[in-house]
Image (spheres, grey):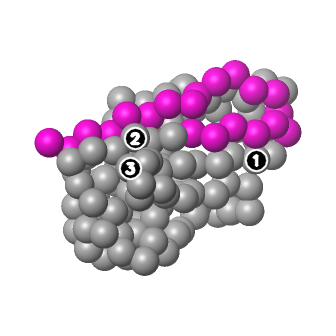
């Protein structure tokens, strides 16, 4: 059974940093891509970053490029999202999701079949 569990969300001041974790089970990173998405109140869910299956190529939304870094630890079955220089507009519920296909990752939500329950990130000004 595929499972994803996010953690690490918190209240942080603007300019601060936070690291989110996505503990995964039921699949291998050799076969599945993993992405991070977020949804702010009153807004649609949007893609933030993803890491491809296999070699682990990464891709970022323009809004977070240079500030966020996605990575994975195969031994710990965990995907991370390191978030630096946080802004109030980064406030959202953050979700990780898995795409069960061997291919370059994408931030298109339709590609992702499995989702975690989300973790809240709040950035105060």
Give, as a single range, the part of the protein colored magenta: 1-20
Residue identified by numbered label 1: 84
Indicate yes or no whether the magenta region holds residue 5.
yes
First along the sequence among labels 1 and 3: 3
First along the sequence among labels 2 and 1: 2
Going 43% across and 77% down the picture, which residue do you hit? 55
Residue toward you, 104 or 38: 104
Residue identified by numbered label 2: 23
Going 80% across and 46% down the picture, which residue do you hit? 85
Q: For label 2, count other residues whose C-alpha is less than 10 Å away and answer few (under 14), some (14-19) or many (20+).
A: some
First along the sequence among labels 2 and 3: 2
Residue 68 image point, x, y percent? 67, 54
Q: CA distance from mark 2 to mark 1?
A: 21 Å
Residue identified by numbered label 3: 77
Q: Is residue 20 above or below residue 9?
A: below
Going 58% across and 48% down the picture, which residue do you hit? 81
Residue 47: image tag: none
Residue 100 image point, x, y percent? 22, 61
Q: Is residue 78 above or below residue 118?
A: below
- Disc 3 element: loop
Indicate yes or no whether the magenta region holds residue 14.
yes
Q: Residue 122 vs residue 112: left or right?
A: right
């Amino acid at each position: 059974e595929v499972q994803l569990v996010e953690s690490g969300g918190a209240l942080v001041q603007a300019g601060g940093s936070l690291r989110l974790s996505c503990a995964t089970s039921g699949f291998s990173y050799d076969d599945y891509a993993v992405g991070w998405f977020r949804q702010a109140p009153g807004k649609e869910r949007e893609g933030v970053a993803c890491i491809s299956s296999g070699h682990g190529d990464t891709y970022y939304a323009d809004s977070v490029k240079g500030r966020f870094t996605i990575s994975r630890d195969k031994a710990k079955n965990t995907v991370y999202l390191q978030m630096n220089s946080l802004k109030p507009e980064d406030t959202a519920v953050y979700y990780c999701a898995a795409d069960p296909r061997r291919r370059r990752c994408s931030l298109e939500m339709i590609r992702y079949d499995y989702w975690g329950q989300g973790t809240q990130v709040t950035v105060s000004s």
